[in-house]
Image (cartoon, rainbow, N blue to C red):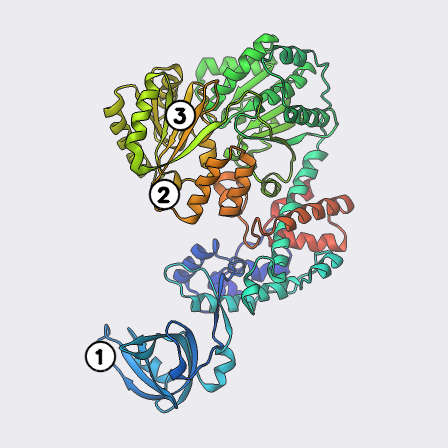
């Protein structure tokens, strides 16, 4: 139970069922710490991503101030932080608040001015008494050739020397909070750090030179040198590993629960699949063959399949999914494929229809567009099993959608749905298998964090005959010449995407930029120019896309709504304006809209100089390779994991201490450790298992414990 003082201060947070009491101090609100009122608490919440003591402890220092440099006044260099021992010589108060209050201080080598704005006279006289010898620390500047410190960072008596002459951590800040305030409050938070049971394997802990959890949290906030700020410093590595292990163990428990649920054996006779393979105008790639073998092996086992099929743009995921679905249909069950948007669902229909018609498979399509009597008829075909394969959008999640016997759920572009929806469609069938597809190549390290509860198959080859896309970097200064070139290409029948730049974080500004570009291009190219953007209704968007696909439009101006999945094989030119504002993954997805047909395709990355180092690396990478997995690794290197696996994309929490790729090896080790733990102690009942439960609560993986209880 929270204490009375915690209740009075409003610091208590509703306890989580089952969470060990020892963790309670970390889950109280920061308003329970000295000096933190409601207004300051809001600033800390903004800064640390939460309003708990624990959130403050995860807010790690990024730099150090060395206050151990203690020269004489005459030797104090400009621009450097110095800790000086001085005698207070004279005060120069100023009645006007907007004018500085000056204090002259001396030592045997010279005089220095301490400058204060909006100063409180009593405060200054208390800390800098006339004739007293004091310690002051701050950045030295020279004004008219004379040294001064404006607003010293620290002031104290001679007894305070040890407290002031230290290595002081520097934190990321937000408006309204100073480093001094963050440091002071963090120190109060550190006083609440409890001793926790050890959940790490003793040999592994010793091998890495790690301390106990509570020791290393304190070391995180008391870096003794520059090396202590590095991700691989033992204190940071220990805390990162704890976080990664909590994530991997939580995913392993989800996986265990899913696999425990009785699956079904699907081993078709291959008749339908052989027909499709003989009708295909191409041979499957080695990667497709390998992935199908892995999928079939899963489906033939009595455990439920939970597999991720990862493939780059154009690697042939749809045919793999089609063959997996036919395996289920051969066994007399139904299969469903769910796409995140109406456009993508319709494209699946276009891709699958010729194959399904060729082997006489009945299918239906269900999206939000189907209403009334039409919808009722579709639901009936699904319920009676007349529809052997169902293609749809989120509409498939809805309660009134009942399958006769759903054997396989294929979820396309899963990162657009969010992790928690992963199993909702699967729940429509008894023990049905799940195949998740993504066209966003993710580095191996991040696959473990986003999809650690799944087995992974990778399509890392492109089908033969695909022509490389000629990617060129073009300065915005040469935009007019490029437009003239486009006019010639359009006369010869080319179709062009023109993607407009991202403008700040505002959809309205993005739209204004697209509207303006659309009008300029319309003036040049006439009425055969279309516009699509995120604020259009789905039906309007579909209509414009349909006109572009059908050849009624030559040039399509778009915001990034065309990023994923739009398929117009006749489009051979992609122009991306202000390409330097886009991330690598986004650029790669956009480029993937061309190069889908037999004709040679081009991608023009239009940039405005001068380019920063990172922007230059991004654009050069795009020019030099089309390998999505290689591009994803480079993206991780340039951006770090936080952006790539942010909450928008994956539904997963962003790391608080762990940093990828720096901790990639620790992530792999955490996955192996989690598997061993589950093999030896699946219910976490051993002494270490109980400590691991504490760790899961500490890293707010409560859901994993619920799985443990209900499993």
Q: On the picture, is 237 further left or further right than 579?
A: right
User: Is 49 placed left or right of 443 in the picture?
Assistant: left
Q: Would you name the residue on which mark 1 appears?
A: 95
Mark 1, other Cα within 10 Å: few <14 / some 14–19 / many ≥20: few
Q: Quadrant of residue 478?
A: top left
Q: Earlier in the sequence, mark 1 or mark 2?
A: 1
Q: Secondary structure at mark 1?
A: loop
Q: Label 3 near label 1: C-beta < 8 Å?
A: no
Disc 3: CA contacts within 10 A as few (<14), some (14-19) or many (>=20): many
Residue drawn where x is 74% and y is 59% of the image: 202
Is 527 rendered above or below residue 592?
A: above
Of marks 2 and 3, the one in the foreground: 3
How far is the residue under mark 2 from the one under mark 3? 27 Å
Mark 3, residue position:
573
Distance from Cα at disc 1 to Cα at disc 3: 69 Å
What label sits on residue 162 in the rendered view? none
Q: Position of residue 113 (x, y in %)?
A: 32, 81
Q: Position of residue 323 (x, y in %)?
A: 63, 19
Tell me the element at label 2: loop
Residue 37 in the image: above or below residue 548: below
Viewer-nearest residue: 152 or 95: 152
Q: Is residue 570 left or right of residue 302?
A: left
- Can you give x and y, in whole percent of width and height, for residue 666 in the image? 65, 51
Q: Nearer the viewer, residue 578 or 21?
A: 578
Relative height, residue 428 to residue 257 (above, below) = above
Q: Nearer the viewer, residue 660 or 30?
A: 660
Q: Which mark is residue 505?
A: 2
């Amino acid at each position: 139970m929270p204490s009375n003082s915690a209740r009075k201060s409003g610091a208590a947070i509703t306890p989580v069922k089952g969470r060990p009491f020892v963790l309670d101090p970390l889950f109280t609100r920061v308003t329970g710490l000295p000096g933190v009122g409601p207004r300051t608490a809001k600033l800390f919440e903004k800064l640390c991503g939460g309003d708990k003591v624990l959130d403050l402890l995860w807010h790690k220092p990024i730099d150090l101030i060395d206050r151990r440099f203690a020269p004489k006044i005459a030797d104090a260099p400009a621009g450097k932080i110095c800790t000086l021992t001085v005698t207070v010589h004279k005060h120069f108060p100023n009645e006007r608040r907007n004018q500085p209050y000056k204090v002259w201080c001396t030592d045997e080598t010279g005089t220095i001015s301490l400058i204060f704005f909006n100063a409180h006279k009593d405060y200054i006289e208390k800390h800098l008494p006339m004739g007293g010898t004091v310690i002051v620390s701050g950045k030295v500047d020279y004004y008219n050739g004379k040294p001064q410190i404006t607003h010293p960072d620290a002031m104290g008596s001679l007894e305070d020397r040890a407290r002031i002459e230290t290595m002081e951590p520097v934190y990321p800040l937000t408006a309204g909070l100073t480093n001094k305030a963050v440091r002071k409050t963090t120190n109060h938070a550190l006083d609440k750090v409890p001793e926790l049971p050890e959940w790490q394997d003793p040999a592994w802990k010793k091998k890495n030179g790690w301390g106990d959890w509570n020791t290393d949290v304190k070391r995180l906030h008391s870096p003794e040198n520059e090396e202590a700020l590095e991700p691989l410093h033992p204190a940071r590595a220990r805390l990162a590993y704890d976080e990664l292990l909590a994530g991997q163990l939580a995913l392993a428990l989800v996986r265990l629960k899913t696999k425990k649920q009785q699956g079904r054996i699907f081993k078709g006779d291959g008749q339908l699949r052989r027909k499709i393979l003989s009708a295909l105008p191409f041979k499957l790639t080695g990667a497709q063959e390998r992935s199908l073998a892995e999928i079939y092996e899963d489906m033939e086992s009595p455990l439920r399949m939970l597999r991720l099929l990862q493939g780059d743009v154009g690697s042939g995921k749809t045919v793999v999914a089609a063959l997996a679905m036919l395996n289920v249909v051969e066994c007399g069950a139904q299969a469903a494929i769910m796409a995140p948007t109406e456009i993508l669902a319709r494209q699946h229909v276009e891709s699958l229809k010729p194959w399904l018609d060729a082997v006489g498979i009945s299918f239906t399509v269900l999206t939000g567009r189907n209403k009334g009597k039409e919808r009722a008829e579709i639901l009936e075909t699904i319920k009676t099993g007349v529809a052997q394969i169902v293609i749809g959008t989120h509409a498939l999640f809805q309660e009134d959608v009942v399958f006769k016997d759903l054997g396989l759920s294929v979820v396309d572009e899963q990162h657009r749905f969010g992790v928690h929806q992963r199993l909702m469609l699967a729940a429509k069938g008894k023990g049905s298998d799940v195949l998740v597809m993504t066209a966003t190549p993710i580095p191996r390290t991040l696959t473990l964090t986003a999809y650690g509860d799944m087995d992974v198959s990778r399509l890392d080859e492109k089908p033969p005959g695909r022509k490389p896309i000629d990617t060129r970097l073009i300065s915005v200064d040469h935009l007019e010449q490029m437009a003239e070139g486009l006019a010639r290409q359009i006369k010869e029948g080319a179709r062009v995407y023109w993607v407009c730049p991202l403008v700040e974080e505002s959809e309205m500004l993005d739209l204004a930029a697209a509207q303006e570009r659309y009008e300029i291009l319309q003036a040049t190219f006439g009425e055969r120019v279309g516009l699509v953007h995120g604020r259009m209704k789905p039906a309007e968007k579909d209509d414009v896309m349909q006109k572009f696909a059908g050849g009624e439009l030559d040039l399509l101006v778009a915001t990034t709504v065309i990023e994923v999945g739009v398929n117009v094989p006749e489009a051979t030119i992609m122009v991306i304006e202000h390409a330097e504002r886009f991330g690598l993954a986004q650029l790669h997805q956009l480029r993937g809209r061309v190069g889908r047909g037999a004709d040679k395709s081009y991608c023009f990355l239009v940039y405005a100089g001068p380019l920063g180092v990172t922007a230059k690396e991004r654009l050069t990478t795009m020019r030099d390779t089309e390998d999505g997995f290689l591009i994803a690794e480079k993206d991780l290197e340039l951006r770090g994991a936080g952006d790539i696996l942010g909450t928008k994309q994956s539904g997963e929490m962003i790391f608080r201490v762990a940093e990828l790729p720096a901790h990639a090896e620790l992530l792999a080790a955490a996955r192996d450790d989690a598997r061993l733990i589950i093999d030896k102690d699946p219910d976490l009942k051993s002494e270490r298992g109980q400590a691991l439960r504490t760790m899961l609560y500490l890293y707010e993986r409560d859901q994993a414990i619920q799985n443990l209880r209900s499993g």
